[in-house]
Image: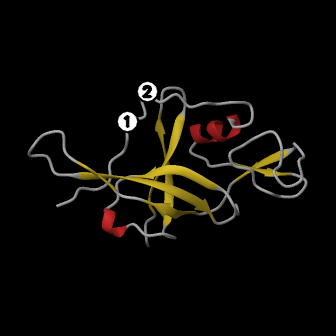
């Protein structure tokens, strides 16, 4: 019997925040996902940085990227700490967004039955506390 995927402990994780990524982390404080999009050519840039990779300009607007989906994933079995504890799993995932072409966010899928995880599946974001910010993790979206 395999348990649902587990949430990593982020409490000691220091998020590297700079002027270019700060709006992403600030959005997380209110549970919102925002990604930088070039004002001139509408290209998304992730990770956030000073110049658009397409037109090399700087101005960005921070927009919601649409429905998150599993782009890729792997299942890592985790043994229980105690001999009688049931095994679990960690599921690192690469996440894409319907309205942000080319954006891929590395995260983790939590509270999911490993057998029910599939590429393209819609997922929902939740935010978990880290040492200096909140970090995005995902759950399978309610199919209803």
Q: Residue at x 32, y 48 (%)?
A: 6
- Above or below for 120 versus 29: below
Q: Which mark is residue 12?
A: 2
Is 23 on the left or on the right of 127, as rendered? right
In the picture as drawn, the residue positioned furthest to the bottom comes out as 144
Instruction: Return the mark for residue 136.
Output: none
Please tell me whether residue 118 is drawn above or below residue 58 in the rendered image: below
Q: CA distance from mark 2 to mark 1?
A: 8 Å
Nearest the viewer among 54 and 108 is: 54
Which secondary structure lies at badge 2?
A: loop
Q: How is the image coloured?
A: secondary structure
How many circles with numbers are drawn on the protein? 2
What residue lies at 81% left-to-right and 39% top-to-bottom? 50
Q: Which structural element holds mark 1?
A: loop
Quadrant position of residue 23: top right
Task: State if disc 1 and disc 2 touch (CB < 8 Å).
Answer: yes
Classify 10 Å Cα crowding around label 2: few (below 14), some (14-19), many (20 and above). few
Q: Quadrant of the N terminus?
A: bottom left
In this rendering, position of residue 104 left or right of residue 81: right
Q: Residue at x 60, y 30 (%)?
A: 16
The quarter in which the C terminus is drawn is bottom left
| x, y percent for residue 56 | 88, 48
Q: Is residue 131 above or below residue 44?
A: above
Examine the rendered structure and indicate whether residue 31 appears above or below residue 43. above
Image location of residue 12, percent across then percent down: 43, 27
Q: Tell me the crowding category of disc 1: few under 14, some 14 to 19, or many 20 or more residues within 10 angstroms, Cα based.
A: few
Q: Is residue 131 left or right of residue 1?
A: right
Residue 42 placement: quadrant? bottom right
Q: Residue 24 at what x, y percent from top left?
A: 66, 41
Residue wearing tag 1: 9
Q: Is residue 66 left or right of residue 36?
A: left
């Amino acid at each position: 019997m395999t348990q649902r995927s587990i949430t990593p402990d982020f409490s000691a994780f220091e998020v590297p925040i700079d002027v270019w990524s700060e709006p992403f982390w600030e959005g997380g404080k209110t549970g919102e996902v925002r990604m930088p999009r070039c004002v001139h050519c509408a290209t998304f840039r992730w990770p956030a940085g000073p110049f658009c990779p397409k037109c090399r300009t700087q101005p960005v607007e921070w927009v919601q990227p649409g429905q998150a989906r599993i782009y890729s994933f792997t299942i890592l079995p985790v043994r229980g700490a105690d001999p009688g504890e049931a095994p679990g799993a960690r599921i690192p995932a690469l996440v894409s967004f319907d309205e942000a072409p080319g954006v891929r966010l590395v995260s983790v899928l939590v509270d999911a039955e490993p057998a029910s995880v599939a590429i393209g599946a819609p997922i929902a974001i939740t935010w978990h506390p880290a040492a200096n910010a909140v970090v995005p993790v995902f759950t399978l979206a309610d199919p209803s």
